[in-house]
Image (cartoon, rainbow, N blue to C red):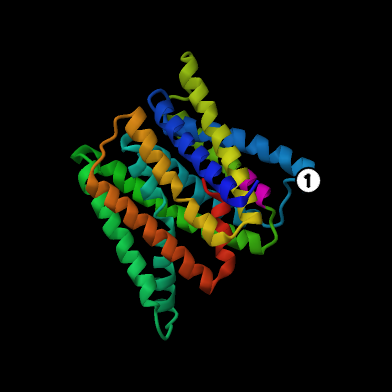
């Protein structure tokens, strides 16, 4: 199957996962959803590692810990924001990670005393944040501001996690092992979050329970498809197609949840997509290996 088609299917499955998160969040807390997402991912990746003969033992456990800490926190905040925001809004805020990484590069260049900072990179950051302002203005009520801030923070922490994934790749860690430890971290975080708030909910609602399991199933399948796409296709094309997830989420949100559709919100999403693609292209020119970070999207 061509890499572009694999990527389109992967983004569709991630969007489907976000739909399931929204349905499940009406019955379960964020911690419980994150736990089951991690459980299914850990079991799947452990089986894949066993089949490949890699195993789960790792010489860089501390690196996995920090990657999981940032990645799981980002995932939890994203799931939390999905519960309280229009679906496409929550997806777009999380996909700001590429723009955040561009901002990190600018900050690093300044701190290290770089001779010049690429003006085009600065422009992508500005365009990205203008897009966010346009999105949040028309689609959020006053009581949704907190969810919006958490969604924005999830994108920032996702950027941190992706940079750590790049470091793990350079250390020679296979991708399924990175996902395995990320999933185990999700299970631990889910338990720590769910237990103090009363533990796990009784699974008496069949539809809600199926949505809970589908979150992990869709996410794991999407990860595998996306990993294959990046292994066989062109990184910039894949990174661009990844933003189809926002389009899918917008359609799902309008059809299933009656999410508001406004010209200003559509314009903001277009700006974020354009800024993300431009930032990815500029980063890839400076450091081509950074492109592989998106293979382990939440």
Asked whether 153 or 272 is in front, the reply is 272
Q: Is residue 180 magenta?
A: yes
Rate crowding at label 1 as few (under 14), some (14 to 19) or many (20 or more) other CA atoms within 10 Å.
few
Q: Residue 259, percent across and down?
A: 29, 34
Magenta span covers which residues? 175-181
Q: Residue at x 41, y 23 (%)?
A: 27
Image quadrant assignment for residue 41: top right
Q: Residue at x 46, y 57 (%)?
A: 159
Q: Residue at x 51, y 56 (%)?
A: 239
- Relative to 66, is 81 on the left or the right? left
Which residue in the structure is indicated by mark 1? 52
- Relative to 72, is 140 on the left or the right? left
The kind of secondary structure the magenta stretch mainly shows is: helix
46 shown above or below 106: above
Image quadrant assignment for residue 66: bottom right
Q: Residue 237, percent across and down?
A: 53, 58
């Amino acid at each position: 199957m061509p890499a572009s088609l694999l990527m389109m299917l992967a983004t569709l499955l991630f969007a489907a996962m976000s739909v399931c998160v929204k349905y499940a969040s009406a019955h379960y807390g964020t911690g419980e959803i994150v736990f089951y997402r991690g459980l299914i991912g850990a079991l799947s990746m452990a089986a894949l590692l066993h089949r490949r003969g890699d195993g789960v033992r790792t010489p860089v456990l501390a690196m996995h810990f920090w990657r999981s800490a940032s990645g799981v926190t980002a995932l939890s905040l994203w799931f939390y924001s999905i519960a309280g925001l229009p679906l496409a809004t929550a997806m777009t805020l999380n996909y700001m990670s590429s723009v955040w990484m561009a901002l990190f590069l600018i900050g690093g260049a300044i701190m290290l005393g770089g001779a010049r900072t690429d003006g085009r990179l600065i422009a992508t950051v500005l365009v990205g944040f203008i897009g966010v302002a346009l999105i949040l203005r028309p689609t959020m009520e006053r009581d949704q501001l907190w969810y919006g801030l958490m969604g924005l923070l999830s994108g920032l922490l996702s950027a941190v996690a992706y940079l750590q994934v790049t470091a793990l790749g350079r250390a020679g860690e296979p991708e399924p092992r990175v996902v395995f430890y990320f999933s185990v971290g999700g299970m631990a975080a889910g338990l720590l979050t769910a237990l103090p708030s009363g533990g796990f909910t009784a699974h008496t609602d069949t539809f809600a329970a199926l949505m809970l399991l589908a979150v992990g199933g869709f996410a794991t399948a999407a990860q595998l498809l996306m990993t294959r796409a990046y292994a066989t296709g062109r990184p910039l094309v894949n990174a661009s197609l990844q933003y189809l997830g926002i389009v899918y989420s917008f359609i799902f949100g309008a059809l299933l949840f009656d999410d508001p559709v406004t010209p200003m919100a559509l314009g903001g999403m277009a700006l974020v997509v354009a800024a993300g693609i431009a930032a990815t292209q500029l980063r890839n020119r400076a450091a081509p290996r950074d492109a592989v970070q998106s293979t382990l999207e939440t």
